[in-house]
Each structure stands twice: as structure tokens, then as C-alpha cells.
Amino acid sequence: MASYPIIDAHTHIEGLPGCDWQDPPELILRLMDEAGIARAVVMTYCDAPLQHESYDPLAYVREACARYPERLIGFARLDPGAPESVALLQQAITEWGFQGLKLHPFGYRQQPDSPDTLKLLRKAAELGVPTLFHCGDEEYTLPLQIERVAKACPEAAIIMGHMGGYFHVADAIQVALRCPNIYLETSATPHPERIREAVDVLGAERVIFASDGPGCDPSIELEKVRILGFSEAQLKLILSENILRLMPEGRKS
């Protein structure tokens, strides 16, 4: 049993009517309990604002975090192309207690360094919260594309979710080496040995544990990190301290 709270930096909840993935917060909480994870960052699969008469993704996350404040941490998943996205981020962080921004450029089909995205990213940096980018094998999400964002907005803390996916992990590590404001996040990578490589190259301070649950099993994702022979000091950084340090609530403690 770890002497520090293990934090999963990327999980999902969803209640959109008709969505194939109906993932209430209780599902990820059960998986967290099975894995021994104390807290998790949660976000929806869909981007806000959403044109739906009865469903607001940000409200769904806000209400879940209000029900389980000791367990869940909200990130606002937003579409940068929406005119109200900057105002929504401001409200989510300053009024609703959200701790970060999530961007999935493949979903809304914008380059990650588009003017709309940079405007939103700069607002996140101004508010002192990190931005989690989906970083995988799809167009608009490749590490070399996200590198342009990191260089255009060096004041922003950028987390590369999935650290390059299946086929672009080497690029993700090299991009993070060139960009000190980039952190690599471990979820869903099929190459645990590349997590070890990332720590060896970047230091444990630049690698963050996450599962992408419930789609990926948090117990398995956690074991991928634990089997790599890291020291307890390194594990504490990867499993807890790094993500806390990037969020407003962590800097206050």
C-alpha cells in the first residue's frame, strides 16, 4: 500500500443520452477501488458546448465531482472552435472548481496550434491549470504537431495523453525533451518499456500516471508502471506528485 494517494490523471464519465459509452461516475469509482487509486481526473467523451436540449457535459462533470469531492477532479473538455469556449473555461475553473482543460483535436478537426486552440490554451495557462491533449496516432494529435503548440505557448503546462499512442512514442519522448513544458502521460500505451525510457530520458518529474479508464482497466494500467523497477521516490512522483503539482489545488497544499 502506497504511503501517498495514487492519482489517475485521465479517466472518463459520460451520461449523454444515446451515447454508446454510458459511464456513470460510480463505474470509475469501482475500478479505482479495485486498483487502490485514491483520486481520479474525470472528463466526458464529448466536447462542450454541446447542442443538446437536456445534457450539458460540464454540468455532468461538475455534479459528479460535487457528489464525490474527495475522489474526483474535473477537467473541462472543450471545443476551441466554439465562441464561448474561453468563457466556459474561465467559469469552470474559477466558479466550479475544475482543475484543468482537455483537448481532443481529432474530434473537432482543428490543428492543435490553430488560433482558436492557442487562445484557449493561453487562457488555461493564465488560470494556472494544465492542458491534457489526446496524443496518439490520429491526424491532429501527433507529437510533432503538439510540439508546435508547446513552442507557441511555452507558459502552458501540456500533458500528452497516451504519450504518442501505439506508433509515435519515440517522437513524444523527443518532443518532451525539446519542450520543458510538456509532460508524458502513460495511459493506454501498449509499450510499458517506453514508460521506463521516458523516465530515463526526461526524469520521473515529467511522467504522469493515468489509465484512460474505464475503457482501459486502471488495475492493469497501474501494474504497467509498477513492474518497471522504479524507486519509491520515482513512483511517488509518477503516481501522485506530478499531476498534483500542475493543478491549483495541489499547489495550495
Image: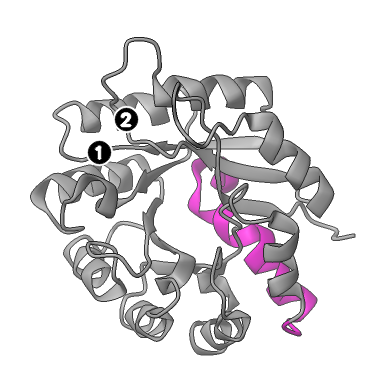
Q: Which residue is mark 1?
A: 79
Question: Which of the two residues, 78 or 28, is positioned nearer the viewer here?
Answer: 28
Residue 93's place in the image compared with 141, above or below, is above
The boundaries of the magenta stretch are: 228-253
Q: Residue at point 24% right, 26% down?
A: 87
Total marks drawn? 2
Residue 112's place in the image compared with 117, above or below, is below
Q: Which residue is mark 2?
A: 48
* Helix, strand or loop under label 2: loop
Kindly indicate the quadrant of the structure image that contains residue 120: top left
Horizontal relation, residue 224 to residue 115: left or right: right
Q: Is residue 231 magenta?
A: yes
Residue 44's place in the image compared with 67, above or below, is below
Rendering coords of residue 97 (x, y %) = 49, 28
Q: Is residue 39 magenta?
A: no
* Helix, strand or loop under label 1: loop
Q: Are marks 1 and 2 in contact (CB under 8 Å)?
A: yes
Amino acid type, label 1: Asp
Residue 246's place in the image compared with 62, above or below, is below
Q: Residue furthest right?
A: 1
Q: Quick one: quadrant of the N terminus?
A: bottom right
Q: Residue at point 19% right, 69% down?
A: 148
Question: Which of the two residues, 92 or 21, is positioned nearer the viewer here?
Answer: 21
Sequence-wise first label, 1 or 2 = 2
Can residue 253 be spotted in the picture?
no
Q: Residue at point 39% right, 10% down?
A: 54
Question: How many residues crowd mark 1 within 10 Å: few (<14), some (14–19), many (20+)?
Answer: many
Characterize the magenta stretch by its predominant secondary structure: helix
